[in-house]
Amino acid sequence: MWGLDLIKVNIGWKIGRPSFIPIWTHKWVDGELPLPLVPTGNSTPSTDQSEFVYQLMLNNSEWNAQILNQVVGETSAKKIKAIPIPSTNQKDTFYWLHSSTGEYDTKSGYGVACSN
């Protein structure tokens, strides 16, 4: 089932509003960060109150910079704050990391498979 594994490794999340993506266990920040995110300082998945992406937002409409800096550190926080938050309620969705549209197609899947 290497094809399914290939797809799982090469998809990301497009956040919704509110976003119920688990912060620590899902790839929801573009591929530049080591994913899943690693908590900083005293914040750990077991002690931090933030479990889902929506908990890093203010009123589900903007990122909470103070919490982001405390939980994931300044560098990761800067990248997260660049992620747009939808202006209307939407579900979280998957997207293909190797396509400008975010949709999987066999041509890009084959290209990724050949490069591995």
Image (spheres, helix red, strand yellow):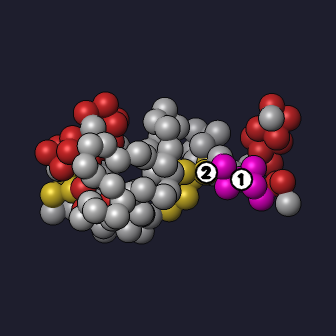
- The answer to which quarter of the image holds residue 24 is bottom left
Mark 2 Cα shell of 10 Å, populated few (<14), some (14-19), many (≥20):
many
Picture quarter with the N terminus: bottom right
Q: Is residue 6 magenta?
A: yes
Residue 2 is situated, as x and y percent measured from the top left of the image, at 84, 54
Amino acid identity at mark 1: Ile
Q: Are marks 2 and 1 in contact (CB under 8 Å)?
A: yes
Q: Main secondary structure of the magenta part?
A: helix
> Where does label 2 land, which residue?
11
**Residue drawn at (65%, 47%), measured in percent from left and top?**
10
**Cα gap from disc 2 to disc 1, whole angstroms:** 6 Å
The image position of residue 13, as x and y in percent, is: 49, 55
Residue 20 vs residue 84, the one in the foreground:
20
Q: Position of residue 32 (x, y in %)?
A: 49, 32
The quadrant where residue 29 appears: top left
Q: On residue 96, which mark appears?
A: none
Instruction: Say which element carries label 2.
Output: strand
Please name whichever residue, 31 or 38, is drawn nearer the observer in this view of the structure.
38
Vertical placement of residue 51 versus 71, above or below: below
The magenta-colored residue range is 4-9
Residue pictured at 15% horizontal, 63% vertical: 59
Would residue 104 be found to the left or right of residue 62 on screen? Answer: right
